[in-house]
Image (cartoon, rainbow, N blue to C red):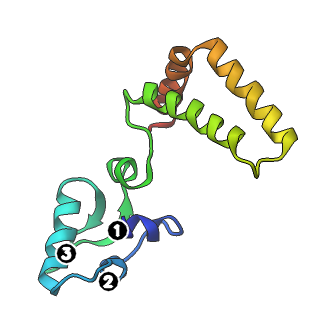
């Protein structure tokens, strides 16, 4: 999660930056090296292993990592997304700090989503994710 917090603002980070962002700090350097190597090997980050390096450098985000750390959609999870979308709309509508005009727009959007059906919204989201390579 700490790595993806840094990657939210950048395309790439160093392993030193990733280690420095870990809270609480690892007990020792070897633990941090093992963690970064595991994340790289399992596809949660995309780091370059240089000849003689002990951990990945030039760390970039991956689809798998973004799904876990940043809530990106997972193929097949579009039904969950659509349900969460309706729930989020409802929460925003019920929030006392939401302006009345915005609340009306959100209600219409929720009603349209429910009229069309969560299943159809799920299919649309799934196709959008496929198209965007998510």
Percent position of residue 59, x then y: 34, 68
Percent position of residue 21, x then y: 37, 79
Question: What is the count of numbered marks?
Answer: 3
- Secondary structure, mark 3, is loop
Mark 1 nearby-residue class (10 Å; few <14, some 14–19, many ≥20)? many
- Secondary structure, mark 2, is helix
Q: Pointer 2: what residue?
A: 16
Cα–Cα gap, marks 1 and 2: 10 Å
Q: Please state which of residues 97 and 120 is positioned toward the viewer in this rendering.
A: 97
Tell me if residue 18 can be seen. Answer: yes
Which is nearer the N-term, disc 2 or disc 3?
2
Percent position of residue 6, x then y: 45, 71
Q: Residue at x 14, y 78 (%)?
A: 31
Q: Pointer 1: what residue?
A: 59
Vertical arrangement, residue 81 with respect to residue 40, above or below: above
| Res. 55 mark | 3
Q: Residue at x 13, y 72 (%)?
A: 34
Tell me if residue 54 can be seen. Answer: no
């Amino acid at each position: 999660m700490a790595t993806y917090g840094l990657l939210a603002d950048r395309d790439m980070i160093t392993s030193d930056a990733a280690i420095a962002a870990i809270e609480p700090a690892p007990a020792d350097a070897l633990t941090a090296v093992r963690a970064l190597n595991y994340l790289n090997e399992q596809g949660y980050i995309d780091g370059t292993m240089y000849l003689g390096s002990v951990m990945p450098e030039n760390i970039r985000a991956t689809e798998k990592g973004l799904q876990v750390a940043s809530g990106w959609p997972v193929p097949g999870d579009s039904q969950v997304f659509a349900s969460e979308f309706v729930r989020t709309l409802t929460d925003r509508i019920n929030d006392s700090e939401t302006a009345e005009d915005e609340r009306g727009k959100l209600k219409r959007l929720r009603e349209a989503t429910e009229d069309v059906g969560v299943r159809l919204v799920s299919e649309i989201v799934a196709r959008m994710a496929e198209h965007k390579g998510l």
